Image (cartoon, rainbow, N blue to C red):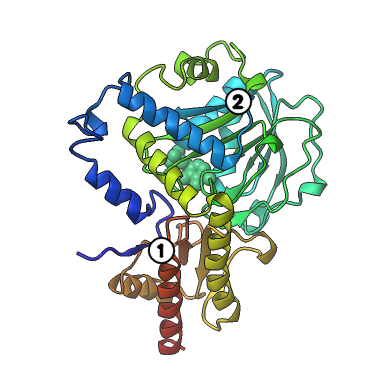
């Protein structure tokens, strides 16, 4: 059976080379006589897998020594609670809400302290990123929170807010490893890996050491304390072993593509092809404000719900999968993460061209 072009927002497509290697190593991982799924997380073989994965991630992102890398479970959603629980020393935090994910994180933070809404773009259905120059960071804020790439609305921060020295916390679930970033601009960076890095089940947290404190909120479950996880090198309990192994393979794959610079170049080329077509189309229209558009998630509509549904159905027949938009935006969404090849975007644009001619 032929593989489809999978535009799912997550879990999403993985590099074919990685899947093939995982298949080859499925029954006998490097002479151990067992699958990575079957081995002890305390074994020598797994110790090397997790250490290599961390080393490769550090190299790819240029993560400084004074940041810890944690491989956790619970998804990005668990971090909506873990972040305030671990970081709210003064019980105050500032949130910028630019979509559903930051809105959920903001709501969760309110359970643990005073969460201030610095800015929101909900007035225009999150089609833009609030003006970061217009925000006023609170004197007593423990951190400033953003969702860097809003997966549903297809917007991204091209400029980070000036947090006046407060740690910046960023959910990068849907733009993880899509381009180089300066880790030192952040206090904490995190994301579920199932969008752009690996299979579901693992969440990576990159946190500056001075933010790893004991008992900020005393009721914080031990397992959700960064201190617990950092002290145990993410092995406080059984980590998501197989997901970590696949992430490690993906890190090596990204290195072979020229690292994050190479990914950025390819991702920009893919996005440009799709946006150029959208900007010139008489039928399709992108829904995010041009200046804030993401190179990872591209939502678009025809303006006619029936035509949108027809497009999704016909696309599926042509091997273009999971192109339906999120229900809060409607229409379509093409998630064009690292592992989506240029050929996939070309096939999508060709299909859209034909659909436009037929449905003028
Ligand atoms: C998908 C997503 C989440 C939720 O991730 P889970 O791992 O399902 O909890 C959070 N933030 C962003 C930006 C996402 O894209």
* Residue underneath mark 2: 84
Side of 142 where 342 appears, left or right: left
Q: Please indicate, yes or no, whether residue 276 appears anywhere in the rendered image.
A: yes
Residue 112 visible (yes or no): no
User: Which residue in the rendered view is the most extreme toward the front?
Assistant: 31
Quadrant location, the N terminus: bottom left
Residue 340 drawn at (x, y percent) = 43, 60
Query: How many discs appear?
Result: 2
Helix, strand or loop at disc 1? loop
Question: Where 206 sits versus 275, above or below?
Answer: above
127 sits left or right of 119 in the view:
left
Q: Earlier in the sequence, mark 1 or mark 2?
A: 2
Res 183 → quadrant: top right
**On the image, numbered disc 1 is attached to which residue?**
324
Which numbered disc covers residue 75? none
Q: Is residue 77 above or below residue 317?
A: above
Q: What is the CA distance from the residue labelled 1 to the residue labelled 2? A: 33 Å
292 to 286, vertically: above or below: above
């Amino acid at each position: 059976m032929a593989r489809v072009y999978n535009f799912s927002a997550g879990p999403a497509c993985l590099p074919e080379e990685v899947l093939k290697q995982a298949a080859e190593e499925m029954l006998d991982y490097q002479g151990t006589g067992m699958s990575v799924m079957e081995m002890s997380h305390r074994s020598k073989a797994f110790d090397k897998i997790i250490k290599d994965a961390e080393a490769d991630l550090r190299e790819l992102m240029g993560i400084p020594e004074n940041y810890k890398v944690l491989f956790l479970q619970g998804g990005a959603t668990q971090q909506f609670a873990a972040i305030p629980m671990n970081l709210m020393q003064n019980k105050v935090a500032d949130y910028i809400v630019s979509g559903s994910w930051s809105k959920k994180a903001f709501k969760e933070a309110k359970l643990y302290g005073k969460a201030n809404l610095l800015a929101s773009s909900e007035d225009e259905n999150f089609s833009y990123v609030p003006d970061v120059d217009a925000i006023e960071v609170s004197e007593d804020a423990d951190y400033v929170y953003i969702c860097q790439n809003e997966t549903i609305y297809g917007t991204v921060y091209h400029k980070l807010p000036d947090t006046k020295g407060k740690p910046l916390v960023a959910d990068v679930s849907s733009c993880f490893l899509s381009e180089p970033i300066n880790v030192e601009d952040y206090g904490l960076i995190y994301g579920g890996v199932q969008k752009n890095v690996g299979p579901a089940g693992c969440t990576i947290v990159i946190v500056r050491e001075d933010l790893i404190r004991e008992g900020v909120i005393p009721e914080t479950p031990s397992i959700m304390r960064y201190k617990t996880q950092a002290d145990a090198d993410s092995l406080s309990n059984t980590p998501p072993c197989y997901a970590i192994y696949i992430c490690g393979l993906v890190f090596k794959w990204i290195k072979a593509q020229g690292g994050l610079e190479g990914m950025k170049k390819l991702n920009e080329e893919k996005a440009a092809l799709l946006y150029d077509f959208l900007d010139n189309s008489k039928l399709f229209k992108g829904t995010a404000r041009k200046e804030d558009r993401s190179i990872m998630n591209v939502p678009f509509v025809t303006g006619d719900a029936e035509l949108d549904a027809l497009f999704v159905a016909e696309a599926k027949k042509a091997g273009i999968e999971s192109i339906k938009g999120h229900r809060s935006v409607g229409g379509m969404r093409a998630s064009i993460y690292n592992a989506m090849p240029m050929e996939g975007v070309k096939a999508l644009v060709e299909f859209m061209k034909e659909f436009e001619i037929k449905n003028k």
